[in-house]
């Protein structure tokens, strides 16, 4: 859940979205594993910043606390951070293996997954084919992860989630369920979404009720809008030209 987006100038190259403290509990009933010891603050999203002041995108994700319960080389290992970047045309509707899907129009074109043992960046084309791009570089700065990518600088929409990390899963995600073991993530239903926190407007609980998440940031699909406008202009020109020719032919 998030607080209102900061007011920024139209030409600003940076957006910051803040998230309230104390909501890293999924639908409110998730129980975090106690082995290893993980605090909710380690998974609690506090802010997300997208910076395009250079030629490529830099993302900063802030948490309530930076923890390393698995002693990963990256200096953090409590969570898995997923950032999905909205595509200009179409995109993937399913938010990878988080158990969530996008709400509204469009979908993601890029997917970043960050854990303490590495980061990946995947691109999906308009046909849904996935390709692997160069891995982002990640560093810890206080209680934040600073992520540098090769994505072209620009205004995008984003879906951001925070899940519990486990080295015992290929994806790194610890999936919630009814298991009560100390190393399990407990939830009220077996098919509950994997994230324990998501970036969403305050009061928006649909991520944990109907498994959908709305994008934040530049959510309008300007390319699609431009194509629709151009199509309308082309149709208007065709109609006007047809009427003009018909009038000329109908003259005595």
Image (spheres, rainbow, N blue to C red):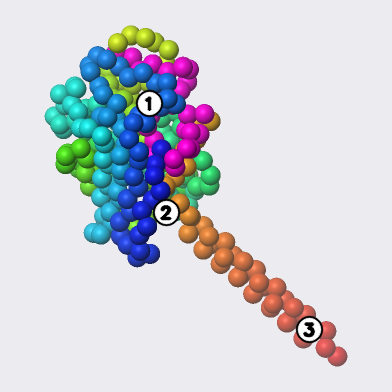
Disc 2 versus disc 3: distance between alpha carbons?
46 Å
Describe the element under mark 3 as helix, strand or loop. helix
Position of residue 134 measured from the top left corner of the image (x, y, whole percent): 25, 44
Q: In the rendered structure, does residue 200 fall within the stretch colored magenta?
A: yes
Quick one: which residue is furthest to the top in this view?
181
Residue at the disc numbered 3? 247
Q: Residue at x 26, y 40 (%)?
A: 62
Task: Provide the residue designation for mark 1.
Answer: 25
Q: Is residue 89 above or below residue 240?
A: above
Neighbour class for label 1 at 10 Å: few (<14), some, many (≥20)? some
Q: Mark 3: few, some, or many residues within 10 Å (few <14, many ≥20)?
A: few
Residue under the image location 52 percent in, 29 percent down? 209
Q: What residue do we see at 60% from left, 70% from top? A: 233
Q: Provide the residue designation for mark 2.
A: 218
Left or right, residue 167 beside residue 82: left
Q: Earlier in the sequence, mark 2 or mark 3?
A: 2
User: Is 239 drawn above or below residue 142 in the view shown?
Assistant: below
Tell me residue 24's x, y (percent).
35, 29
> In front here: 80 or 170?
80
Q: Position of residue 170 (x, y in %)?
A: 30, 23
Relative to 172, is 61 above or below? below
CA gap between label 3 and label 1 equals 69 Å
N-terminal of the pair, mark 3 or mark 1, is: 1
């Amino acid at each position: 859940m998030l607080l209102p987006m900061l007011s920024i100038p139209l030409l600003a190259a940076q957006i910051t979205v803040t998230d309230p403290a104390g909501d890293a509990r999924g639908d409110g009933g998730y129980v975090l594993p106690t082995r290893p010891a993980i605090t909710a603050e380690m998974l609690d999203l506090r802010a997300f910043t997208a910076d395009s002041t250079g030629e490529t995108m830099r993302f900063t994700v802030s948490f309530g606390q930076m923890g390393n319960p698995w002693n990963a080389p990256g200096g953090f290992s409590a969570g898995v951070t997923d950032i999905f970047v909205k595509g200009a045309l179409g995109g993937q509707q399913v938010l990878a293996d988080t158990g969530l899907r996008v709400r509204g129009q469009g979908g993601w074109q890029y997917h970043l997954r960050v854990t303490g043992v590495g980061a990946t960046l995947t691109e999906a084309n308009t046909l849904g084919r996935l390709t692997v791009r160069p891995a982002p570089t990640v560093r810890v700065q206080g209680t934040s992860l600073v992520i540098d990518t090769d994505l072209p600088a620009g205004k995008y929409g984003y879906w951001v989630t925070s899940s519990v990390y486990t080295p015992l899963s290929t994806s790194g995600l610890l999936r919630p369920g009814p298991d009560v073991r100390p190393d399990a993530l407990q939830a009220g239903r077996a098919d509950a979404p994997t994230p324990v926190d998501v970036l969403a407007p305050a009061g928006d609980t649909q991520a944990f009720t109907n498994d959908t998440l709305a994008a934040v940031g530049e959510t309008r699909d300007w390319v699609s809008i431009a194509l629709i406008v151009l199509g309308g202009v082309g149709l208007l020109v065709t109609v006007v030209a047809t009427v003009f020719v018909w009038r000329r032919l109908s003259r005595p």
